[in-house]
Image: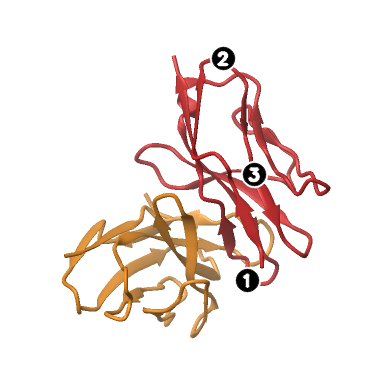
Chain colours: A orange, B red
């Protein structure tokens, strides 16, 4: 099953620790996105990147950081500054030309203990 | 600011009944609207987009700019339609999606 992968599936973190979520795609997509999903709130955009070595804040970027060193990879770091990090995190990618369907990964569920 | 509203958290219907999942949006530009679906234990995936004006799995959605709505409809619900449905709006430029809060559709036998 190619496409877009996220790891790990479940992640537990102690308060005060940073943690990095992995997102990889083999679709040759230019753009990648991180969303956070909370019950009853839909998905909210954290960060996005349209080109290697460049990224922009989304609607809820505080407490998060990203990097885009390779086209295929867009890891998300949840820092200790994020006040309420327990959530389901979804990564997505899309082409910038033509059809703009976003393809989603399976998600990572982060729980802060 | 752009916003997508799905007023129903849960919609429960019987098999064979018509279904309408409501979606309203606010956006200053020309909107691109989508419906995404998440079946149990599966990834979020695109169901349909307004530009294509297509019918997927019997579902259709018409963009009504006057009412700023993009309701999803199906004349006869099937049990396999049970899932979480999200309406989403794409902003020009960043291509990121603004999602509604989602509606869970339950189709009972």
Q: Residue B83: horizontal and vertical position, in percent? A: 46, 35
- Chain letter behind tag 1: B
Quarter occupied by the C terminus of chain A: bottom left
Instruction: Write down the residue under mark 2.
Output: B16
Instruction: Write down the residue under mark 3.
Output: B23
Is residue B68 shown above or below A48?
above
Which comes before the other along the chain, label 3 or label 1?
Answer: 3
Which comes before the other along the chain, label 3 or label 2?
Answer: 2
Answer yes or no: are tags 3 and 1 on the same subunit.
yes
Q: Residue at x 68, y 33 (%)?
A: B60
Q: Residues within 10 Å of mark 3 (few under 14, many from 20)?
A: many
In the visual, does A7 lie left or right of B69?
A: left
In the visual, does B63 lie left or right of B107?
A: right
Disc 3 versus disc 1: distance between alpha carbons? Answer: 22 Å
- Chain letter behind tag 3: B
Question: Which label is found at residue B94?
Answer: 1
Q: Quadrant of residue A90?
A: bottom left
Q: Residue B74: horizontal and vertical position, in percent? A: 64, 26
Q: Residue furthest right?
A: B66
Which comes before the other along the chain, label 1 or label 2?
Answer: 2
Looking at the image, is mark 1 or mark 2 nearer the viewer? 2
Looking at the image, is mark 3 or mark 1 nearer the viewer? 3
Question: Which label is found at residue A61?
Answer: none
Q: Quadrant of residue A83?
A: bottom left
Q: Residue at x 43, y 37 (%)?
A: B39
């Amino acid at each position: 099953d190619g496409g877009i992968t996220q790891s790990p599936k479940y992640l537990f973190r102690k308060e005060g620790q940073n943690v990095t979520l992995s997102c990889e795609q083999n679709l040759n997509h230019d753009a990648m996105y991180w969303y956070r999903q909370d019950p009853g709130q839909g998905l909210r955009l954290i960060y996005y990147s349209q080109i290697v070595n460049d990224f922009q804040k989304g609607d809820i970027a505080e407490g998060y950081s990203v990097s885009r060193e390779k086209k295929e990879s867009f890891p998300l770091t949840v820092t200790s500054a994020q006040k309420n990090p327990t959530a389901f995190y979804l990564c997505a990618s899309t082409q910038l030309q033509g059809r703009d369907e976003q393809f989603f990964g399976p998600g990572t569920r982060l729980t802060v203990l | 600011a752009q916003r997508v509203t799905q007023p129903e958290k849960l919609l429960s219907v019987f098999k064979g009944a018509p279904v309408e999942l409501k979606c309203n949006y606010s956006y200053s530009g020309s909107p691109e609207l989508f419906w995404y679906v998440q079946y149990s234990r599966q990834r979020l995936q695109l169901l349909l987009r307004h530009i294509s004006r297509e019918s997927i799995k019997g579902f259709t959605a018409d963009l009504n700019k006057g009412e700023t709505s993009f309701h999803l409809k199906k004349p006869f619900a099937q049990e396999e339609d049970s899932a979480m449905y999200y309406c989403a709006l794409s902003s020009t430029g960043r291509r990121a999606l603004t999602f509604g809060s989602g509606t869970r559709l339950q189709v009972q036998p």
